[in-house]
Amino acid sequence: MTMKIDPRSPADLSAQIAQAIRDAIVSGRLIVDERLPSESELADQFQVSRPTVREALKRLAAQSLIRTQRGASGGAFVNRLNFEDAYSQQITTSTLLLSMNAVSFDTACEARYALERACASLSAQRRTADQLATMRAEIFRQAQPGLTDEAFCASDVAFHRALVDGAGNPVLSYQLAGAVEAMQPLMNMITFGARSREEIISLHTDIADALEARDAATVDAALIKLESYTRQLAQDVAEQRRRPA
Amino acid sequence: MTMKIDPRSPADLSAQIAQAIRDAIVSGRLIVDERLPSESELADQFQVSRPTVREALKRLAAQSLIRTQRGASGGAFVNRLNFEDAYSQQITTSTLLLSMNAVSFDTACEARYALERACASLSAQRRTADQLATMRAEIFRQAQPGLTDEAFCASDVAFHRALVDGAGNPVLSYQLAGAVEAMQPLMNMITFGARSREEIISLHTDIADALEARDAATVDAALIKLESYTRQLAQDVAEQRRRPA
DNA sequence: GACTTTTAAATGTCAGACAAATGAAAATTT
DNA sequence: AAATTTTCATTTGTCTGACATTTAAAAGTC
């Protein structure tokens, strides 16, 4: 592993070193579980001090590209990026992206349901009995009186998560996790009254029934209804805020 | 901003500090463009040394959560996460996720086209003349003889990117960027002969024509054909490798 | 041979220093 | 007085050297 950095570049040395190692990982020159040279060795190779190397390694650790282990046979190892780590990173990124860029509820909602509908027909073909049971259980929870809005939303996420997982495609699940979970803060702005909860639960039941019957078209129709109902609810909230009682 | 960390925790101090600040940003206690205390002040607050604080800040910088500036009125500032930064992060993550976890071509391909089809009907409604022109231009490029496989793939990505952007929903574009671009290394394994290029270009033309006519159903049908054709090509490559000529 | 102790190697953390950039204040010149 | 230059304090970037902690392997002991 012989990589060069430019000490005259305006960029931080640690950023350059991190990029050099990142490139090596992405391109496959460094493979999973391979051990990087020790911090001292890297410092020698890049002609920088150990703290600078450490800052570079922390950058990579923040992206789950490497993991470190202390001790005699320790060091920094190329990390196998698993779906779980990728999920949580994507959720953080998506959440911030939505909250910091004033993405409208409609835009986020449209994206979410467009993606979810993409999974629905696959889910109708492949959903397991377990996944269907999860959805039924979440519907049951949603019907409990005294549920807080947050808990209702969380259950909603779990329901839709099971729907997406039903497609049996981990790449789809990964992509969708970000979209669905990142919307939760936006969804939490909505107050779900008893009447609207009833309506949502009814549509969820339609979806579960259609999935049980492996009827993709009906799932799709229910999702469309759910989307427009959700957007309607958000609009009502926005209007109430504009002219309060 | 008073945050606490646990010096007895097994986790690195810099990781704990990074998480504390990350939480403050995600929860909104630190807002965009707000300046963090200086490294020395943070070191005092968290009762750690400056190098440790710096490692924490580099972790956050790697996620584009903060930016730093040198000089008298410099410091670390909460960064407004923009779509571009989020794109590139997601592409890195998705690419590694696919390459490191032996995701099959079929799985990735299915995910990609499912998501893309989700955009297609919106794109048929909303695509601009510019986006249509981009697609036509990429089709023209794809028809050039002497184009390398890599260049053909890159043009393919640009074509599909324009299709996705046609939906006019930045959240969708962001989500799809990862899925489409991450597949490029996998797609590059395929050798595109003259005959298969012709077929793909023909389907691309069908898609562009249908988008021009704002005919969502025909776009969807062409995408389905394109997916099955792409998977067929990959299967042929795999078979040729199994029993070479 | 099984167990304990020692040791070496690696990361984690700290302290203090200097370099470089940068904006603001002060001094100087016009 | 206005404009320019100089000085200066602040902050991040980098370096050196040291010590603490963890860990696995080697050495020693029963």
Image (cartoon, coloured by chain):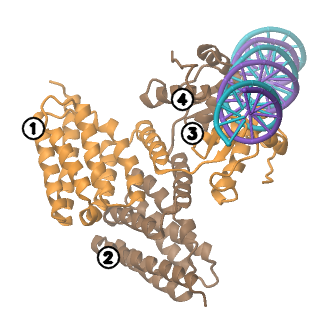
Chain colours: A orange, B brown, C cyan, D purple
Q: Which residue is mark 4?
A: B33
Q: CA distance from mark 1 to mark 3?
A: 42 Å
The residue most toward the bottom is: B245
Mark 2 / mark 3, whichever is N-terminal? 3
Q: Which residue is mark 1?
A: A195
Question: Which chain letter goes with mark 1?
Answer: A
Which one is in front in this view, the residue at disc 3 or the one at disc 4? Answer: 3
Residue A48, given in percent of the width and then of the height, sits at 82, 38
Foreground pick, B81 / A203: A203
- Give SS at disc 4: loop
Which one is in front in this view, the residue at disc 1 or the one at disc 4? Answer: 1
Q: Which residue is mark 2?
A: B221
Residue B163, given in percent of the width and then of the height, sits at 42, 66
Q: Which mark is residue B64?
A: 3
Task: State which quadrant residue B49 falls in.
Answer: top right
Circles 3 and 4, Cβ within 8 Å, touching? The answer is no
Question: Which chain letter goes with mark 3?
Answer: B
Q: CA distance from mark 1 to mark 4?
A: 41 Å
- Give SS at disc 1: helix
Mark 2 / mark 4, whichever is N-terminal? 4
D18 over D9 or under it: above or below: below
Which amino acid type is marked by label 3?
Answer: Ser
Q: CA distance from mark 3 to mark 4?
A: 13 Å
